[in-house]
Image: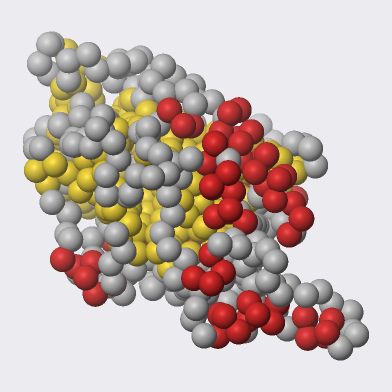
Amino acid sequence: MEMDADNLCLNSLTLDPQELKLRIHLVTWNVGTAPPPKDVNSLLLLDTSCLEIDMYIVGLQELNAKVVNFLSDLAFDDPWSLFLMDILAPLGYVKLSSIRMQGLLLLVFVKHKHIPFIQDIRTNYMRTGLYGYWGNKGGVTLRMSVYGHMMCFMNCHLPAHMENTNQRLDDFERMLEAQQFDGESVGSILDHDLVFWFGDLNFRITDFGIHFIREVINGNRYNLLWDKDQLNIAKKKEKFLQGFLEGPLKFKPTYKFDLNSDVYDTRWQKALFGFNGKKRKPAWTDRILWKLKNASDDESSETIGSEYDQVLKVHLEKYTSHMSYGISDHKPVTGTFTVQMKPLLASAPVSLRAEGEWHADHDALISYSVAKDFPSSTWDWIGLYRASFRHTNDYVTYAWVKDDEISFSEDCNQVYVGADEIPLDGGEFLLCYFCHNLQCLAGVSEPFQIQPGRTLEAKEGVQKISDGSSITDNFMGDGF
């Protein structure tokens, strides 16, 4: 089902013990090594004030992967991650996880309230460039349990050029077969309850010439091209593509454009008149598809089969391109989905709270309790985060649940945080419990205030001591 943007406001998130609706906004964009643009409000639907997005999935291709840039991005967050965190963190979204392979990047942002219900986060990748030795082509994959339902997201960049259809299909089939995840829950990609497949898939339009294609596009008669789209053709023939669904292509082909323009590649004109250049036929290279477990091609997005019919449903609300962005020769494509489910995980596995009033110059206590059969580990920890934290590693300090434990019982455990680890400037904070076995934040506390402590000078002195220096170090020169 496709809905106009104006109607999206009518379907706000509903929370019910028997039914949960999550709105997922998925972005795919070949950015052509360019830095982020100044404004992505329309791309992320931030200009639609009444629309509540629960989860952003952002898949980028052709990030700047020069050696210097790539090594820098491995040590620090890449420019695109920082850019999106700057925008989404103040709105209450956290970067929950990511996976990077050379020019491919997959990012997941979620609202705070959903964090404890997203578990078992695992990532994988597969190189297909240069016979599997180079990561300019291939796929990055992230899977997670969302309220107990296993979801998998695949961001792919498949081989280019009209004649490489079979190579594209072979590479994707190998990814489906070869990518496995650690853990006991779900191993292969197609065993997940819901799979999203997206990226620069590079499928082209066959048979028709460039002039006819341009006339059809100018007349907004896109349906005349659908039967000649290589991916649509393959979906009817290839068994491993059965059950993958896609919204109607009611937007302009997203490749290939002149930079900073909505004009298709003008090099074809030079080729036409004998100059150097190539005839680049427009094509829908940038796509978003999804597949529900056990669904087949003849099943619509509304109904997914008897086993899951009352458990998990997917509704496509909007599938479109965004023509206003011109940093690369591709236009970004977005899909907005409502995933309707019966939550299999009804309450957070861990509950925790800050005991009493916290002051920056006093030790503090944290109380927490875990659900029955919770897979706790000696590697679990509780992090102190600022209320507007940007990603899961953005903690100010942490306490090990075992090493820093001071009391425990069946109903409640307590750990302490030393005064020297609490920020002196105070402010609004919250606590998050990290579960090593599930690779997730399994519990989030209510926000609370920390009262500010000593002066900046005292803070600097404490910092010197905590760094291992002593008072005598300040008086000892290199001669001693």
Residue 472 in view (yes/no): no
For the residue pair 195 and 103, the one nearer the viewer reads as: 195
Q: Quadrant of the N terminus?
A: bottom left
Left or right side of 114 for 232:
right
Question: Seen from this angle, which residue lies furthest bottom?
Answer: 273
Choose top left, top right, bottom left or bottom right for residue 296: top left
Depicted 9 relative to depicted 258: above or below = above
Residue 56: x and y, percent? 37, 54
Question: Seen from this angle, which residue lies furthest top?
Answer: 409
Residue 177: x and y, percent? 58, 28
Residue 233: x and y, percent? 58, 53
For the residue pair 239 and 176, the one nearer the viewer reads as: 239
Question: Who's the residue at 44% across and 19% down the image?
Answer: 183
Left or right side of 167 for 247:
left
- Image coloring type: secondary structure
For the residue pair 389 and 26, the one nearer the viewer reads as: 26
Question: Who's the residue at 71% across and 40% down the image?
Answer: 128
Residue 186 in view (yes/no): yes
Left or right side of 107 for 232:
right
Depicted 446 relative to depicted 456: above or below = above
Choose top left, top right, bottom left or bottom right for residue 419: top left
Depicted 455 relative to depicted 278: above or below = above
For the residue pair 99 and 354, the one nearer the viewer reads as: 99
Residue 78: x and y, percent? 56, 54
Question: Who's the residue at 27% across and 44% down the image?
Answer: 303
Depicted 340 relative to depicted 399: above or below = below
Q: Quadrant of the C terminus?
A: top right
